[in-house]
């Protein structure tokens, strides 16, 4: 019985700590590691953190940028645009600044980074006549993180 309790306690601590020791403990800086509808099992298979006890648009499936990034991008498997070729390795994929996720069977593993269009985001340039509105900005999540 004592060994069983020790196992349960040890396993519980490891499960709470997540993939990188205590990287899931800091919940102030969450970056989306999933997509709308991702479940806990798929999230954890991506070595991300999971916390469904949040509200207000806070991601359930997340990683902390300070502690973890490995080419994971929040793109649903059905939305992935191929960025590689048959037989491409993770290293080759990431060297092309593409995303890598092999946790979802029958989905593209090497795929393009998401492009976000934020219609409420405006770009202004000031001139002699005041500020002039330019086209809405398009943000490309082009992170260059050493692997």
Image (tube, grey):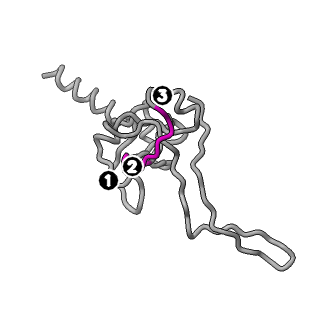
Chain-order first, disc 2 or disc 3: 2
Find disc 2 in the rendering and name its residue: 76
Along the polypeptide, which appears first: circle 1 or circle 2? Answer: 1
In the rendered image, residue 6, in percent from the top left (x then y), is placed at 23, 24
- Determine the residue positioned at 39% across, 41% down: 49
- Number of dots carrying numbers: 3
Specify the quadrant of the image occupied by residue 124: bottom right
**Going 33% across and 49% down the picture, which residue do you hit?**
38
What residue is disc 3 on? 88
Task: Note whether residue 89 is visible.
Answer: yes
Q: Outermost residue, right direction? A: 128
The question of residue 76 being in magenta is answered with yes
Q: Are marks 1 and 2 in contact (CB under 8 Å)?
A: yes
Residue contact at pointers 1 and 3, CB within 8 angstroms: no
C-alpha separation, residue under disc 1 versus residue under disc 2? 9 Å
Res 68 seen here: no
Residue 141 to residue 45: above or below = below
Instruction: Give me the disc on residue 56.
Output: none
Q: Answer left or right for 44 relative to 111.
A: left
Using the image, determine if residue 62 lies above or below residue 3. Answer: below
Q: Comparing marks 1 and 2, which lies closer to the viewer?
A: 2
Residue 129 falls in which quadrant of the image?
Answer: bottom right
Quadrant the C terminus occupies: top right
Q: Quadrant of residue 66?
A: top right
Instruction: State which quarter of the image contains the N terminus.
Output: top left
Q: Nearer the viewer, residue 67 or 97?
A: 97
Q: Position of residue 60 (x, y in %)?
A: 37, 50
Q: Which residue is the extreme one toward the left?
A: 1
Depth check, front residue: 112 or 39: 112
């Amino acid at each position: 019985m004592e060994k069983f309790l020790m196992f349960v306690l040890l396993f519980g601590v490891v499960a709470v700590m997540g993939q990188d020791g205590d990287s899931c403990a800091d919940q102030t800086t969450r970056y989306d590691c999933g997509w709308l509808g991702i479940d806990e099992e798929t999230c954890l298979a991506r070595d991300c953190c999971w916390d469904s006890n949040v509200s207000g648009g806070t991601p359930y499936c997340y990683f902390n940028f300070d502690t973890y990034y490995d080419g994971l991008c929040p793109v649903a498997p059905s939305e992935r645009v191929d960025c590689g070729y048959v037989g491409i390795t993770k290293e080759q994929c990431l060297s092309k600044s593409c995303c890598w996720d092999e946790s979802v069977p029958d989905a593209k593993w090497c795929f393009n980074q998401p492009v976000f269009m934020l219609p409420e985001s405006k770009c202004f340039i000031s001139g002699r006549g005041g500020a002039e509105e330019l086209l809405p900005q398009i943000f490309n999540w082009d992170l260059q993180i050493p692997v």
